[in-house]
Image (spheres, rainbow, N blue to C red):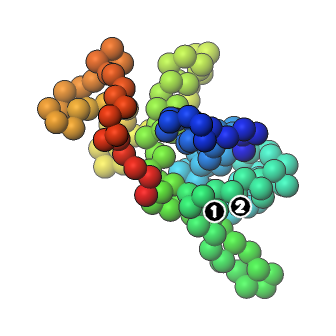
Amino acid sequence: MLHRTYNDQNCSVARALEVVGERWTILILRDAFRGVHRFDDFQRSLGVARNVLQTRLLRLVDEGLLERRRYQEHPPRHEYRLTPRGEDLWPVLLALMEWGDRHRSAGEAAPRAVHRDCGGALTQRCLCSACDAQIEVGDVELRYDGSGTRAA
């Protein structure tokens, strides 16, 4: 997706952008979270060129974010389903949606993410794993002490 790599940087954001840092990729994931699974439905929703969509879908499968499943034998047709690794990006999409609602909506009514059981609006909150305090950006420091999360 990106034309350069960040192997020389000790930065999880840069490494994540290697996988999801292209606009069609994020929009494909958004649609997958909304229940779109089939190639033609992605293409119709996004209006992306078929060759670009094919390339992005295959990359997401190769990266383990989507799983390709056959749903028809003749002719062979496949659908794309989120894997647990892909589902882990849900908070990222929710945060982007909240940011877009707050800063780029131009007064338009956009779809809201709500809890299916009670209808309550979802919010993106950062909580400390040790004390459950809600954390704001000024409360954070990055530490390079070797105890960070390792990729699975």
Question: From this viewpoint, which residue is outermost toward the bottom?
Answer: 74
Q: Quadrant of the C terminus?
A: bottom left
Q: Quadrant of residue 73?
A: bottom right
Residue 37 at x, y percent in the picture: 63, 61
Residue 13 at x, y percent in the picture: 52, 35
Q: Residue at x 58, y 53 (%)?
A: 32
Residue in front for this viewpoint, 142 or 9: 9
Up-down relation of residue 119 to residue 72 (above or below)? above
Question: From this viewpoint, which residue is outermost toward the left?
Answer: 131
**Residue on which disc 1 sits:** 61
Q: Quadrant of the N terminus?
A: top right
Marks 1 and 2 sit apart, C-alpha to C-alpha, by 5 Å
Residue 78 at x, y percent in the picture: 69, 72
Q: Residue at x 74, y 75 (%)?
A: 77
**Residue on which disc 2 sits:** 58
Residue in front for this viewpoint, 99 or 14: 14
Up-down relation of residue 50 to residue 121 (above or below)? below
Q: Amino acid at mark 1?
A: Val
Residue in front for this viewpoint, 30 or 121: 30
Query: 87 left or right of 49?
Result: left
Rendered image: mark on residue 84: none
Say whether residue 97 is visible. no
Q: Quadrant of residue 107?
A: top right
Residue 86 at x, y percent in the picture: 51, 54
* Neighbourhood count class around disc 2 (C-alpha, 10 Å): few under 14, some 14–19, many 20 upward: some
* Neighbourhood count class around disc 1 (C-alpha, 10 Å): few under 14, some 14–19, many 20 upward: some
Up-down relation of residue 123 to residue 30 (above or below)? above
Residue in front for this viewpoint, 17 or 48: 17
Q: Secondary structure at mark 1?
A: helix
Label 1–label 2 contact, CB within 8 A: yes
